[in-house]
Amino acid sequence: MKVKREPEDFRVDERIAVRPAERGRYVLYRLSKRGLGTIEAVDLICRRWNLAGRRVSYGGLKDRHAVTTQYLSILEGPDRPIREPSFELEPVGRLDVPYGPQHFDGNRFGIVLRDMAEADAASAIDALERLPADGLPNYFDDQRFGSVGFSGEFIGHAWLKGDHERALRLALAEPTPFDRSGVKAQKAVVRRHWRDWAEAKARLDRSSTRSIVTYLVDHPEDFRGAFARLKRELRTLYFSAFQSHLWNLLLSAWIDRMTRPDQRVPVDLKVATLTFPRGLDEGQREAFRAAAIPLPSARTPEPAGSMGELAREVLTPFQLEWKDLRVRHLKDVFLSKGSRAAIVYPEDVRAATEDDGLHPGRKALRMGFSLGKGSYATILVKRITGAAGAASPTDGEP
């Protein structure tokens, strides 16, 4: 099975929940892009219009490897479009407040899975059609962990433990599978000349990395101050990635506790193997539907009872306690508080198979569905395909 064989095979459309007006300080835009991440697109827009990044607000990040539509606002932004090969920005009205997560209620997905055997496609459709009733574990998927390099270490974890030098080194020098050629070269220079800041500076082209290294030339031991000079958006992603990983582990442990061994299917993600439930009885479905898992953060009350026990089990290997989940020394970055639904339920599910024009003799599964904001369509793909082999031949459910 192949996903994202072509950019058009993975479409995401943000479902806006605010009505733009003719007046307001914030111009609202529709951003359509392909092969480009949200942060990259915003950087291009800011350079094109010579804008400070703080004037731009958006509701969420959309996958680079897809065709996506989302919305953003710019304080006193230009009332004109941008049209580039990789993205288009179109003004659609104005708002009195900056556009944010509260202004959209989810995403509509259109996905094509290719190179499938006919039986596998049929099994995937069957599993998909059960999801509106059975639900889907609300895991954060691999896109959340793009900052995790080949070492598997989390930048946010190093910072929370107080190892500021390690956090900075992971951010500036740790290679990841998604680094583009220019970034790879920069990281290689920083790795080779770590702590020899003058030499590293001499070998780097002008860039944000070189600016941070220049700071270290004058302040060679101030790793905390150098880390604070990374873009806020990147630092936010680093801590969100680690928090999301902890939350995934907590949800997986909770599912393990709530199910029998024969109801569990392990599925490999980039940074962990997580449990997907199957074959739940009606009582379990009701418990799953009502469950919310706390976001690991000192800003969220430490859970009590069995959830507290699970939280301690998850945190112990990281040598952390709940009270340690606080971003110290950075005033503009924090771990989110609150809770997140354990299970989500796709809506408006549609699916059909067709001959795969890219793989003769094989089938393509074309499907559409809606998920609430913050939920990952790729988790749904894993749910209906990656675990299919573990299903019994009688029920066909992963």
Image (cartoon, rainbow, N blue to C red):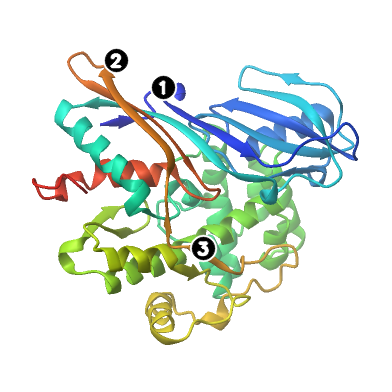
In front: label 1 or label 3: 3
Pointer 2 residue: 358
Instruction: Please tell me which of labels 2 and 1 falls first in the chain.
Output: 1
Q: Amino acid at mark 2?
A: Leu
Pointer 3 residue: 340
Give the distance between the C-alpha atoms of the residues marked 2 and 1, in whole angstroms: 10 Å
Q: Is residue 128 left or right of residue 263?
A: right
Pointer 1 residue: 6
Which structural element holds mark 2?
A: loop
In front: label 2 or label 3: 3
Give the percent coordinates (x, y) of residue 230. Answer: 69, 53
Give the distance between the C-alpha atoms of the residues marked 2 and 3, in whole angstroms: 39 Å
Q: Amino acid at mark 3?
A: Arg
Which structural element holds mark 3?
A: strand
Q: Amino acid at mark 1?
A: Glu
- Residues marked 2 and 3 touching at CB (< 8 Å): no
Front residue of 32 and 353: 353
| Residue at the image point whose x is 29% and y is 45% from the top | 130
